[in-house]
Image (cartoon, helix red, strand yellow):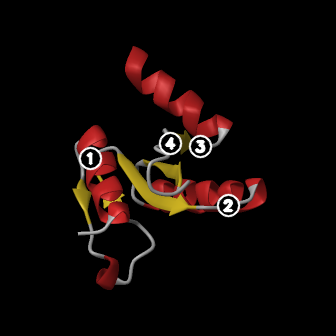
Amino acid sequence: MTDWRDYERKCAAVIGGKRFAASSGGRVDIESDSLVAQCKERAEISFPEMGRLAAEMEAIGKERGKLGVLFVRHKAGRGFPSPGMVVMSHATFEALLERRTT
């Protein structure tokens, strides 16, 4: 088992969702009742790329009546653990907060 699969499983557990195998061919890596997400573990990822991926997940989420987010973790190398981040648009963040208060 590779680290990126472990990371996808961890993210799926956090949102109470299901992980889809990479061979499934879809753009969504994990999905729960309220969220769709893609997970990326990379040594380098640009800010514009993160924005593009977050927007893509937001669009797919809207199609499914869900919110879309991007999970990102810096792959710094063996012995250099790094925290994961959740990337989403302001609109998605506002909707997430709204769902918590209603």
Which of the two residues, 18 or 81, is positioned nearer the viewer here? 81
Report the amino acid beneath label 4.
Answer: Ser
Q: Is residue 93 left or right of residue 61?
A: right
| Residues tagged 1 and 3 counted as in contact (Cβ below 8 A) | no
The residue that label 3 is drawn on is 88
The residue that label 4 is drawn on is 82
The earlier-in-sequence mark between 3 and 2 is 2
Residue at 56% across / 59% down in the picture?
A: 59
Report the amino acid beneath label 1.
Answer: Asp
Q: Is residue 100 left or right of residue 2?
A: right
Identity of the residue furthest to the right in this view = 48
The residue that label 1 is drawn on is 33
The N terminus: image quadrant: bottom left
Report the amino acid beneath label 3.
Answer: Met
Residue at 58% across / 28% down in the picture?
A: 94
Give how far across and how far down residue 26 sits, in percent: 39, 77
The earlier-in-sequence mark between 3 and 4 is 4
Which one is in front in this view, the residue at disc 3 or the one at disc 4? 4
Residue at 41% across / 48% down in the picture?
A: 66
Give how far across and how far down residue 49 sits, in percent: 71, 62
Give how far across and how far down residue 70 sits, in percent: 52, 52
Find numbered disc 4 in the image and state the secondary structure of the residue it sits on: loop
How far is disc 1 from disc 2 in space, using C-alphas? 28 Å
